[in-house]
Amino acid sequence: MIHFTDLRAGYQGRSITPSLTGSLAAGSLTAITGENGCGKSTLLKTLAGLISPSAGHFCIHSSEIALLPQQQSLDRTFPLTVRDIVMMGCWQQRTWYGRLPSAARRRVEQALAITDITAIADYPLSHLSGGQLQRTLFSRMWLQPSDVWLLDEPFTGVDEGTIARLMSLTQQVAAAGKTVVMVLHDDHLVQRYFDIQVHLTAQAAQWTTPRTSHPRPLAQVI
Ligand SMILES: Nc1ncnc2c1ncn2[C@@H]1O[C@H](COP(=O)(O)OP(=O)(O)OP(=O)(O)O)[C@@H](O)[C@H]1O
Ligand SMILES: [Mg+2]
């Protein structure tokens, strides 16, 4: 689904990330890790098409890409409710006079239920806790007609129960064929859920397969 060839991400032609070469298959869950400032967000912005690669190239076999940006980059002062934000996930289905068809409206309610935010659907964006905001953004992504999910630290300030729920949702969409790339700092989550880990350092990108690199010892299974 996503192929990298000597890809480096950066700004104004100056590379920040090391060179990346490899492929992420459809249905895979990939974790991007590394120290603050190593270029994880810059890499996701590049994959989302917001900035150009500083070197090399990449290819995504999908016309639609959903991006959940890092929290501090969101403007929380917009006068929007939770439902308004979730609805944006299916704005392409609006009729010419701006109304959503009833099937799409039902999907919006389903998307609210899936992350358990139906009760706060009319809350304004400015009133949401960190975890409520992340649930809202996951619901919006779930509605988006994209084959690729790019998520930048979606669990910052989110409690463990919510993380487990949102990770389980992420696994389900990957199992249904979406390619998921997530930036995160939590090694336990990486080991537990992710098929591929790309760890960025200034010198190199280290590709590993966390879930298969720690097979359960056979003796314990028996
Ligand atoms: N718009 C920009 N123009 C130029 N440089 C930038 C821009 N945005 C970020 N940078 C720089 O790029 C480098 C990588 O930033 P990036 O946000 O990708 O790091 P990160 O790995 O996501 O860090 P964190 O873990 O803190 O989120 C930093 O040195 C940062 O100062
Ligand atoms: Mg970042």
Image: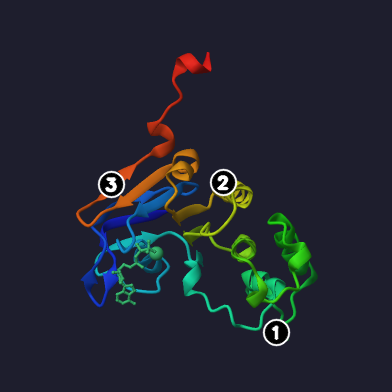
Is the residue under label 2 in contact with that under label 1 (CB below 8 Å)?
no
Instruction: Using a 10 Å C-alpha cutoff, classify the residue at mark 3 as few (fewer than 14 neighbours), some (14 to 19) or many (20 or more).
Output: some
Q: Give percent across and percent down for residue 185.
A: 42, 52
- Tell me the distance, in whole angstroms, between the alpha carbons under discs 2 and 3: 23 Å
Q: Quadrant of residue 139?
A: bottom right
Q: Amino acid at mark 2?
A: Gln
Badge 1 is on which residue?
96
Q: Quarter for ligand 1? A: bottom left
Vertical placement of 185 versus 91: above or below?
Answer: above
Considering the numbered disc 2 on the image, is that residue within a helix, a strand or a loop?
helix
Instruction: Using a 10 Å C-alpha cutoff, classify the residue at mark 2 as few (fewer than 14 neighbours), some (14 to 19) or many (20 or more).
Output: some
Q: Nearer the viewer, residue 88 or 221?
A: 221
Q: Amino acid at mark 3?
A: Gln
Residue 185 is left or right of residue 135, and the answer is: left
Badge 2 is on which residue?
171
- Tell me the distance, in whole angstroms, between the alpha carbons under discs 1 and 2: 35 Å
Vertical placement of 163 versus 121: above or below?
Answer: above
- Earlier-in-chain disc, 1 versus 2: 1
Is the residue under label 1 in contact with that under label 3 (CB below 8 Å)?
no
Q: Give percent across and percent down for residue 1.
A: 42, 53
Q: Which mark is residue 206?
A: 3
Residue 90 is left or right of residue 29, and the answer is: right
Direction bottom: furthest residue: 97
Q: Give percent across and percent down for residue 21.
A: 27, 52
Q: Nearer the viewer, residue 51 or 75?
A: 75
* Mark 2 residue's CB less than 8 Å from ligand 2: no
Q: Nearer the viewer, mark 3 or mark 1?
A: 3
Q: Give percent across and percent down for residue 201.
A: 26, 54
